[in-house]
Image (cartoon, grey):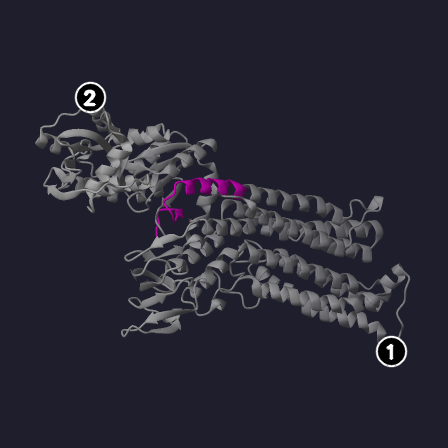
């Protein structure tokens, strides 16, 4: 990022209009001026992933590649999420629920409890078993199918527990139908399957909603594009058929079909979904546009530079999918806990069976206790506690211009003690601007600035643009000047109201043999101490105003530094600029720790220096020139990289060059971790309380959980975890 500023300084040495400006000397020699699911039984249940362990989840095996397929836009179906699972569980739930009604009505046990009877007819005693068998095969079989990979991979988990519970209930019911028809357990098995299907349906819906950002990103790409033919006419073609070099017409309100460069037309483009920018961005000839962004009121002719998987949108989608699939420390802990829970459940079930058999003999009550333990212990909530939160936080980040390459980086951001900002292009704009003005007696700043901007005319030099930009910013009306003449190596001369007016640097004053008034002399000296360049407005050989120019501090930087301090995070600044320049920026922003005159190859040493003090360090740079420092830091954040997702040195990429987005990272990291911990506490706490109840420890006082009630509690715990994760969406990242 400091490359632009370095070019500015080099240009300043050769500025034919302004000569040498005070403060340029302090930059000489600074070549350092360059400152930007696998779902195996719900273990590791990463929301948008493939559920590779869930063979029963038919048609859902795309995994992380799915979003990329959409990039070529073979139709929106290419991006497969949990919609298929959700529909499957919904359908099976309703069918099973309807089939459960006759099972309940013809259950001898329920008839005895509720005091009613159904009319008997030949074969009526087989209604319950037959319908229960259909429910077991239709509603329960998916759970058994999904348990097979768990057993095969020797990683038994939730599906194995559910399969054991419904299989034991079904087998016992068949046995009881022969030995003691009044003890039939078919109705419990049927209602258990119904509740498990309902719980999974709700879970899949929550997972789909958590992965909403990927779906929304996929929808951004239009299906068709208007390709401009050599004769100037247009043809409508599939977006996937576009090639690099094609010319496309983007009409007002249409989505841009591929990455490209505007060759004709002007418009404002809405990039909010990809960059988080709240306002449309003006685009004109030479400006880059991103596939999937929305054109404003003007028409654009765009030359295609990237299509399909090579587009920025496809890269962002791959990045989001990969981040949602990678596992953080917290999720690995939850996965291990879910794995151990299976063995704990088996042990508790075995102890329950033995204890109750010894106490009352083997009967239906013993079986109920065992089945209830197996159902209650399903690590459903534990398996979802972290992945749902991760899916939501990653999606929130993506829609706010925060692209997470490494989930561990986002998780560790909450523990950062100090943030090192690379100065140029990050805390500053990376371009010259007027930062201070002084005038002689009889002149006010606005009058002087307007005249200087008028004299600069249409010059495209960096300093000329800086003066005009300042005048435009203040809304000044420029006076009419004539007779422009460039004075090589000195500045520029023009005529205003019959007077000769000059704008230039110190060499201009030497040429005119003009001396500075005391006020302007002091101003020049102070600017020199800060490493700022100074140009002068001279009227009839008399200097009447001085303008200090420097790399302008971003207005957002003040807010970013202040908010980081409020969060208890120390802020440091790193730059290849001189001590004077660095100190001036640091003082303006209130930054105490400053590393100046640092060569690019030594930047990582400053990171190590802070780490040796026991501090956890985040480095904010451009991802290219600062790669070693970004890699060395505990958390590397590339800022201002646009939609370039190929930066390997950074764990997190910020699309915009807004330092306030750095604050969003830490806020999101902390909020995400809080939600993870809340969910883990609930999931583990639920099992700690529910397992003893399922085993029947309160049976002596008349409190007993049936398998159906256990299934309800298990499903409720999962729903609570899912709802709590969704509450993260209420967080305002600012």
Query: To which quarter of the image does residue 242 belong?
Result: bottom left
Image point (30%, 40%), residue name: 476
Q: Quadrant of the N terminus?
A: top left
201 relative to 478 in the view: left or right? right
**Residue at mark 2:** 518
Residue lying at the far bottom of the rendered structure: 122
Does residue 397 lie above or below 153 as drawn? above
Residue lying at the far top of the rendered structure: 518
Horizontal and vertical percent position of residue 336: 56, 48
Horizontal and vertical percent position of residue 494: 15, 40
- Tell me the element at label 1: loop
Image point (71%, 55%), residue name: 711
Horizontal and vertical percent position of residue 306: 33, 63
The verdict on residue 579 being magenta is: no
Disc 1: CA contacts within 10 A as few (<14), some (14-19) or many (>=20): few
163 relative to 106 in the view: left or right? left
The verdict on residue 657 being magenta is: yes
**Residue at mark 1:** 122
Does residue 64 lie above or below 436 as drawn? below
């Amino acid at each position: 990022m400091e490359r632009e500023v370095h070019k500015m300084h080099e240009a300043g040495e050769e500025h034919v209009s302004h000569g040498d400006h005070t403060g340029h000397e302090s930059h000489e020699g600074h070549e350092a001026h360059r400152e930007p699911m696998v779902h195996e039984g719900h273990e590791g249940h990463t929301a948008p992933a493939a559920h590779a362990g869930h063979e029963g989840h038919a048609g859902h095996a795309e995994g992380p590649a799915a979003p990329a397929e959409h990039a070529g836009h073979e139709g929106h179906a290419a991006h497969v999420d949990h919609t298929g699972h959700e529909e499957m569980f919904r359908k099976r739930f309703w069918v099973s629920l309807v089939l459960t009604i006759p099972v309940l009505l013809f259950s001898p046990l329920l008839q005895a409890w509720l005091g009613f009877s159904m009319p008997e007819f030949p074969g009526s005693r087989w209604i319950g078993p037959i319908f229960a068998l259909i429910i077991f095969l239709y509603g329960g079989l998916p759970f058994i199918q999904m348990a097979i990979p768990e057993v095969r991979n020797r990683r038994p988990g939730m599906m194995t527990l559910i399969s054991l519970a419904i299989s034991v209930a079904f087998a016992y019911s068949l046995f009881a139908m022969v030995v003691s028809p009044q003890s039939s357990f078919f109705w419990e098995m049927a209602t258990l399957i119904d509740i498990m299907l309902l719980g999974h349906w709700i879970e899949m819906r929550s997972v789909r909603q958590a992965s909403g950002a990927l779906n929304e990103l996929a929808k951004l790409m239009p299906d068709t594009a208007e390709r401009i033919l050599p004769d100037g006419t247009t043809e409508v073609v599939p977006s996937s058929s576009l090639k690099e070099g094609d010319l496309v017409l983007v009409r007002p309100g249409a989505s841009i079909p591929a990455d490209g460069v505007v060759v004709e037309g002007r418009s404002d483009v809405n990039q909010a979904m990809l960059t988080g920018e709240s306002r449309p961005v003006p685009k004109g000839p030479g400006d880059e546009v991103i596939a999937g962004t929305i054109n404003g009121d003007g028409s654009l002719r765009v030359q295609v530079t990237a299509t399909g998987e090579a587009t920025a949108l496809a890269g962002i989608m791959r990045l989001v999918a990969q981040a949602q699939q990678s596992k953080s420390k917290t999720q690995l802990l939850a996965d291990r806990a879910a794995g151990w829970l299976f063995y704990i459940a088996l042990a508790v079930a075995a102890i329950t069976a033995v204890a109750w058999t010894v106490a009352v003999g083997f009967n239906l009550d013993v079986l109920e206790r065992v089945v209830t333990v197996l159902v209650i212990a399903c690590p459903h909530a534990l398996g979802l506690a972290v992945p749902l939160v991760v899916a939501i936080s990653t999606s929130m980040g993506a829609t706010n211009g925060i692209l997470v390459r490494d989930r561990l980086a986002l998780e560790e951001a909450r523990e950062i003690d100090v943030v090192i900002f690379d100065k140029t292009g990050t805390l500053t704009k990376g371009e010259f601007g007027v930062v201070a003005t002084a005038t002689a007696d009889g002149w006010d700043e606005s009058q002087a600035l307007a005249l200087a901007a008028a004299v600069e005319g249409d010059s495209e030099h960096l300093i000329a643009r800086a003066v005009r930009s300042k005048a435009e910013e203040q809304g000044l009306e420029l006076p009419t000047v004539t007779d422009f003449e460039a004075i090589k190596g000195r500045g520029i001369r023009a005529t205003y109201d019959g007077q000769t007016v000059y704008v230039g640097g110190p060499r201009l004053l030497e040429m005119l043999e003009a001396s500075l008034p005391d006020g302007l002399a002091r101003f020049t000296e102070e600017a020199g101490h800060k490493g700022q360049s100074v140009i002068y407005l001279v009227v009839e050989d008399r200097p009447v105003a001085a303008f200090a120019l420097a790399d302008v501090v971003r207005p957002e930087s003040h807010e970013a530094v202040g908010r980081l301090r409020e969060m208890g995070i120390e802020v440091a600044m790193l730059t290849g600029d001189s001590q004077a320049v660095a100190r001036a920026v640091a003082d303006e922003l209130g930054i105490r720790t400053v590393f100046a005159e640092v060569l690019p190859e030594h930047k990582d040493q400053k990171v190590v220096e802070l780490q040796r003090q026991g501090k956890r360090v985040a480095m904010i740079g451009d991802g290219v020139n600062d790669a070693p420092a970004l890699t060395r830091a505990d958390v590397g954040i590339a800022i201002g990289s646009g939609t370039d997702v190929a930066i390997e040195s950074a764990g997190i990429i910020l699309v915009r060059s807004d330092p306030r987005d750095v604050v969003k990272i830490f806020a999101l990291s902390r909020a995400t971790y809080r939600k993870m911990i809340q969910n883990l506490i609930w999931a583990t706490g639920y099992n700690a309380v529910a397992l003893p109840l399922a085993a029947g420890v309160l049976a002596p006082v008349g409190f007993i959980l049936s398998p159906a009630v256990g299934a309800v509690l298990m499903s409720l715990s999962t729903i609570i975890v899912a709802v709590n994760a969704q509450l993260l969406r209420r967080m305002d990242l600012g």
